[in-house]
Amino acid sequence: NLVEEAKRIAAYQAVDDNVLNNTAVGIGSGSTVVYAVDRLAERIKAEKLKIVCVPTSFQARQLILKNNMVLGDLETHPDLSCVIDGADEVDENLVLIKGGGGCLTQEKIVASCTPKLVIIADHTKQSKNLGDRYKKGIPIEVIPLAYVPVQKKIETIFGGQAPVRMAKSKAGPVVTDNGNFILDWQFPPETLNNSWESINNKLILIPGVVETGLFINMASRVYFGLQDGSVISKV
Ligand code: DER
């Protein structure tokens, strides 16, 4: 379908433009990244590239192994030449909401290990402001014992609702690869009167908050696959 094709062409363009031989590359999480891994595996075979792939989640690790690519980690490869990852929403300043797939913490850590975070997305992710299209809220990873006090602090200080993300194929809350819960903060409209930087700096200081799905000043380049089959990229 059109959205899947848009994801694919963005992913292919991003891999072709950014992956160089003899480098270590961060592999993101989610469904769009699957296309990037397909393309990367194709290029490695066709061009006999030497690439080490560092995962951002168990899902990414499975993708790397399934495609017989060389698996690395941040202990052996702490400097990544690029990281290719998806996003749930991208605003006009390239601030991202990530974490729709629950992998935001390892994604942000891996993203912090490269000068080149390359985001791939279909056109449904491109917004003027965060929240225009992605309505599930900003994912916030929390230590399980703290989720109620963190939820109350967020709702009191910032407004809106921050429900804990419940699992679909497991009873109870979603448990992340790090053994934590996720709150999806549906922020109120007036939140947009402040900078995401100032909001993020306050959220991250709440005891029990592990990481937020706000990626600010991190994306180097964003590739959007469009409905007409073209790809645009924004820096
Ligand atoms: O959870 C994440 O951050 C993923 O990258 C997610 O935001 C993108 O997933 P998608 O490519 O399946 O939309």
Image (cartoon, helix red, strand yellow):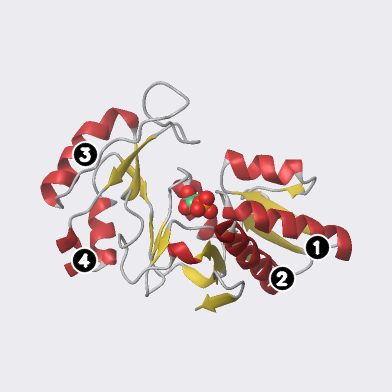
Disc 1 vs disc 2: Cβ atoms closer than 8 Å? Answer: yes
Looking at the picture, how far across and down is residue 128, in whole percent? 33, 72
Residue under label 1: 43
Q: Earlier in the sequence, mark 4 or mark 2?
A: 2
Foreground mark, 4 or 3?
Answer: 4
Residue drawn at the location 37% of the way across and 28% of the way down: 173
Q: Amino acid at mark 3?
A: Gln
Q: Which mark is residue 16?
A: 2
Give whichever of discs 4 and 1 has the lower sequence position.
1
Please state which amino acid type lies under the numbered disc 4.
Answer: Leu
Which of the two discs, 1 and 2, labels the residue nearer the N terminus? 2
Provide the residue designation for mark 3: 151
Q: CA distance from mark 1 to mark 2?
A: 8 Å
Residue drawn at (33%, 30%), measured in percent from left and top?
144
Look at the numbered disc 1 and give the secondary structure of its residue. Answer: helix
Whole-percent x and y of residue 192?
Answer: 21, 66
Q: CA distance from mark 4 to mark 1?
A: 42 Å
Vertical placement of 32 versus 233: above or below?
above
Q: CA distance from mark 4 to mark 2?
A: 36 Å
* Residue type for callout 2: Asp
